[in-house]
Image: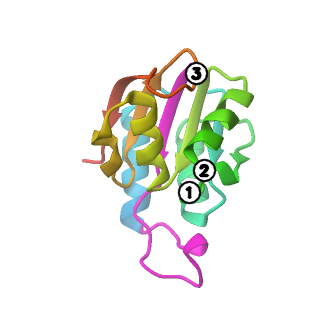
Amino acid sequence: MDLFFLRHGEAEPRAASDAQRRLTRSGEGDVLAVIESRRSELAGLELIVTSPYRRARQTAKIAAQALDFEPKLLVSEHLEPGAEPQALLRFIDSLAAESILLVTHQPLVGNVLSLLSGDNIWLATGTANLVALQTQAPVPGFADVRWAQIPD
């Protein structure tokens, strides 16, 4: 199973609610650059799943357009910032797909990457960072980090 975790791009500092914060122009550009730089590695995606927060949905849409990804984007509360990492792992397992891009937030993305890889370095995952994992199943400590891409 190939799991690609993408933290949303830089977002505006304030909005009516945290869930409504939009990407900045810089954030949009960073997401596009990261996706474009890893286009070949992302070519076999079966699913793109995103948090319902506006900045994550915008990030997922940029990725889908850049990759000419035609299936509908899935939206899941399991990818919200405060979601439970173990619940996300169960959700990923239920998807029964071999190649998934997950668009999410901190602190969730750092916690899940650290949990899957067994390495706490991922707790500081920045905006528009894309991390590729390979695993037989979404089980703590059994994923191999294949690569990480950060904006230039």
Query: Would you place residue 33 above or below residue 107 in this image?
Result: above
Local SS, label 3: loop
Q: CA distance from mark 1 to mark 2?
A: 9 Å
| Part of the protein shown in magenta | 1-24
Where residue 31 appears, as percent x and y from the top left, is 42, 50
Where residue 4 appears, as percent x and y from the top left, is 49, 33
Q: CA distance from mark 2 to mark 3?
A: 22 Å
Query: Would you place residue 20 above or below residue 56 in this image?
Result: below
Where residue 83 appears, as percent x and y from the top left, is 59, 54
Disc 3 target residue: 44
Q: Magenta span has 37?
A: no
On residue 79, the disc is 2
Residues under numbered marks 1 and 2 in contact, where contact means CB atoms less than 8 Å apart: yes
First of labels 2, 3 by sequence position = 3
Q: Magenta span has 2?
A: yes
For the residues carrying marks 2 and 3, which lies nearer the camera in this image? 2
Quadrant of the drawing holding the N terminus:
top right
Quarter of the image for residue 45 reads top right
Badge 3 amino acid: Gly
Local SS, label 2: helix
Badge 1 amino acid: Ala
Quarter of the image for residue 98 reads top right
Name the one closer to the observer, 29 or 98. Answer: 98
- How many other residues sit within 10 Å of disc 2, few (<14), some (14-19) or many (≥20)? many
Q: Residue at x 55, y 35 (%)?
A: 67
- How many other residues sit within 10 Å of disc 1, few (<14), some (14-19) or many (≥20)? many
First of labels 1, 2 by sequence position = 1
Badge 2 amino acid: Leu
Disc 1 target residue: 56
